Image: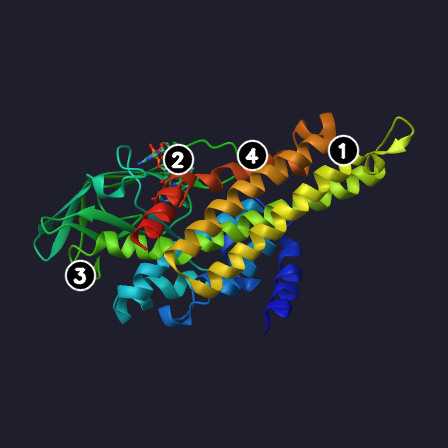
Amino acid sequence: MDATAQRTHFTAAAVDFEGFTDEATVCARLARAGFTRVAVPTSAAAFELGTLCAAREALAYRSGMADGVLAVLGLGCQPLLAAGTDEQRARWVHPVAAGTAACGFALTEPEAGSDVAAMATSARRDGDGWMLDGKKTFISNAPIADWFVLFARTEVGPTAFVVERGDPGVRIDADVPLSVPHPIGSVVLDGARLPAGRQVGAEGAGIKLALGTLDAFRTSVGAAACGMAQRAFDEALAHVKRRRQFGKALAEFQLTQARLADMAVDLAAARALVEQACAARTRLNVAIAKLYATEAAQRVIDSAVQLFGGLGVMRGNVVEELYREVRALRIYEGTSEIQKLIIARELLRG
Ligand SMILES: Cc1cc2nc3c(=O)[nH]c(=O)nc-3n(C[C@H](O)[C@H](O)[C@H](O)COP(=O)(O)OP(=O)(O)OC[C@H]3O[C@@H](n4cnc5c(N)ncnc54)[C@H](O)[C@@H]3O)c2cc1C
């Protein structure tokens, strides 16, 4: 399928997710609609960033919640696809791909956010398994996940593990109320005992695996931002043609036209940078795309709210929901400031 055909395909498949927020059925529905296999491919080599971006843009246009869940299924499975064993993939990844299980990606801690290397969660050998202590916070999908790829520090260094929801000593707290529908919570490890077979990849390779996973998915956050911004733009365009003040449609005022033009330019630039990052996949291009697309989407959505006037801040209005929805995209998978640091580092390195 070429890029245009993909866009058409996912746009049609996403229609059923309009305003969707049901945590209980989201994974089965994403799999049925063909989205999950894009975020959770059969192997690391089968991962197609451009396809994931097309899927996320279409889904985010309809439901930020469904898009967020999909992305985290991908984040959770990617380390196992990249560094896990066939047994691990069969046991944990394949059910996620089929829509019968959900997973999460547990990296952030109360005292280790942007500075992931500051992680304090510990793992020590316990017979032929491991014992883990610590807390992971802001973990998307925590309320619905059957398992997590979780990063903890062994005496060698940060290492990836599979932690199941039902493992002894594991507690899931739904203690992170957000401004938007988004399943999220904390994973608390209190002498959590993991049997043999739970370590993913080499001991000490956890940071590389975590950052490699985020690098692979970060461009698609920009694509989701484009989907949200496009939706806000479409809603605003329809509104300014319909709404009349001073005897004219809002669309007839040049200040409105200038705002629409600025929104369209921001959106086109964001999409172009996402496409460029999909093609080049360098750390520089990826950081530029994530930074620009998420910041531009915030501007476009803010403009849409302004064009709606009072209706723009009414609960339940699509642009009001998008205004809350888009905000976190500038924070997770590396804040805008962290993207700037990456861009500068890459440029200075020459
Ligand atoms: C909705 C949502 C979902 C999330 N899902 C997950 C998930 O599934 N799994 C997971 O592991 N984590 C998840 N996170 C956590 C997310 O990755 C972190 O919130 C993010 O990395 C920022 O960390 P922090 O919140 O601790 O902020 P901090 O790191 O404390 O940063 C606070 C502010 O300081 C700035 N700052 C930090 N360091 C620097 C610096 N060196 N120079 C300049 N400015 C700096 C930041 O840019 C930010 O503006 C999620 C977060 C949100 C909001």
Nearer the camera: disc 1 or disc 4:
1
Label 4 neighbour load within 10 Å: few <14, some 14-19, many 20+ = some
Q: Which residue is mark 1?
A: 255
**Gap between marks 1 and 4, in whole Å?**
25 Å
Across and down, in percent, residue 175 comes to 38, 31
Give, as a three-letter code, the residue at label 4. Answer: Arg
Across and down, in percent, residue 110 comes to 29, 33
**Gap between marks 3 and 2, in whole Å?**
31 Å
Q: Secondary structure at mark 4?
A: helix
Across and down, in percent, residue 301 comes to 62, 38
Label 3 neighbour load within 10 Å: few <14, some 14-19, many 20+ = some
Name which of mark 3 and mark 2 comes first in the sequence.
Answer: 2
Query: Taking 60 as reference, is 70 left or right?
Result: left
Q: Which residue is mark 2?
A: 174
Query: Taking 346 as reference, is 169 left or right?
Result: left
Name which of mark 1 and mark 3 comes first in the sequence.
Answer: 3
Across and down, in percent, residue 113 comes to 31, 37
Q: Which residue is mark 4?
A: 324
**Gap between marks 1 and 2, in whole Å?**
45 Å
Q: Which residue is mark 3?
A: 202
Name which of mark 2 and mark 4 comes first in the sequence.
Answer: 2
